[in-house]
Amino acid sequence: MTDDGKAHSRARFSQYAQGYVTSPTHSGGSDLDLMLTLAAPQPHWLALDIATGGGHTALKLAPHVGTMIASDYALPMLDAARTFIDSRLGAAHNVRYLPADAEALPIAADTLDLITCRIAAHHFPDIFRFVLECARTLKPGGVLVVQDQTVPDDPKDSAYVEAFERLRDPSHGEALPVYKWEGTFLDAGLVVDEAGTISRESPMLAWAERQGCTPDVVERLHLLMIQAPERVAAWMKIRHAGTADAVFDHTYVTIRGHKPG
């Protein structure tokens, strides 16, 4: 990450750490089950969850691997994850905690059996560097499963969705369309095993509140929803725009790859 990008993301997520522990989007849903299914973890595996946020993915995987490492660049976020996971698993468990930059992992090459990253990569200034680090640290045969916000293939439609996201959270970097995720895995030397999308409903006001949006920002978010071009409105599945019940869908890509060998 660039220094400015790192500082911005760390500051934002340090400020709102607890909200991501309790967030319905991050704490539950069938997408967590999908992550587990695609990972197909084994009891002897060493696994790493990058940008663990509230720790929900690490908690989901922990009972199925030998050692689970939960990492995050924002220390208050990692502390929040530690408190949450420890409260669920008790004093003795297999989760370890590691402060780490997703683009410069403090882990030796060919070490990990599994890496996961859920709803975080769009905050990384250099997604390719992140995937390269995953490829470096995975053992031959090791698995990478990423879930993240995705955007339409059309650049104009994508730009509108991204402007909406950045208005709510200026630390939002870039969400990639599915074809770019597949290309990034391939360029990093990984084999793509599976890639697909799922959608989840996002009540706009609760989504904005999680990032502490001011009334002015909320009003502008309403306007972007009301004025969304037809194809963008269809992609986002915007409903009840301009009202307290305004809601839209986030679309997520879930992609699994492995390191050859």
Image (cartoon, grey):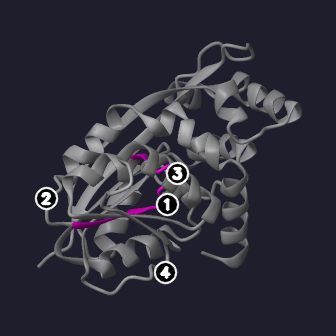
Q: Is residue 206 magenta?
A: no
Calculate the distance from the C-alpha at mark 2 to the C-alpha at mark 3: 25 Å
Judging depth in this view, the residue of 248 and 34 nearest the camera is 34
Calculate the distance from the C-alpha at mark 3 to the C-alpha at mark 4: 25 Å
Pointer 3 residue? 83
Mark 1 crowdedness (10 Å alpha carbons): few <14, some 14-19, many ≥20: many
**Quadrant of residue 113 within the rendered picture:** bottom left
Mark 3 crowdedness (10 Å alpha carbons): few <14, some 14-19, many ≥20: some
Amino acid type, callout 4: Ala
Q: Which residues lie in the magenta part?
A: 46-56
Pointer 4 residue? 104
**Front tag of 3 and 4:** 3
Of pointers 4 and 1, the one earlier in the residue sequence: 1
Whether the residues at callouts 4 and 1 have beta carbons within 8 Å, the answer is no
Q: Secondary structure at mark 2?
A: loop
Of pointers 1 and 3, the one earlier in the residue sequence: 1
Whether the residues at callouts 1 and 3 have beta carbons within 8 Å, the answer is no
Of pointers 2 and 3, the one earlier in the residue sequence: 2
Judging depth in this view, the residue of 130 and 97 nearest the camera is 97
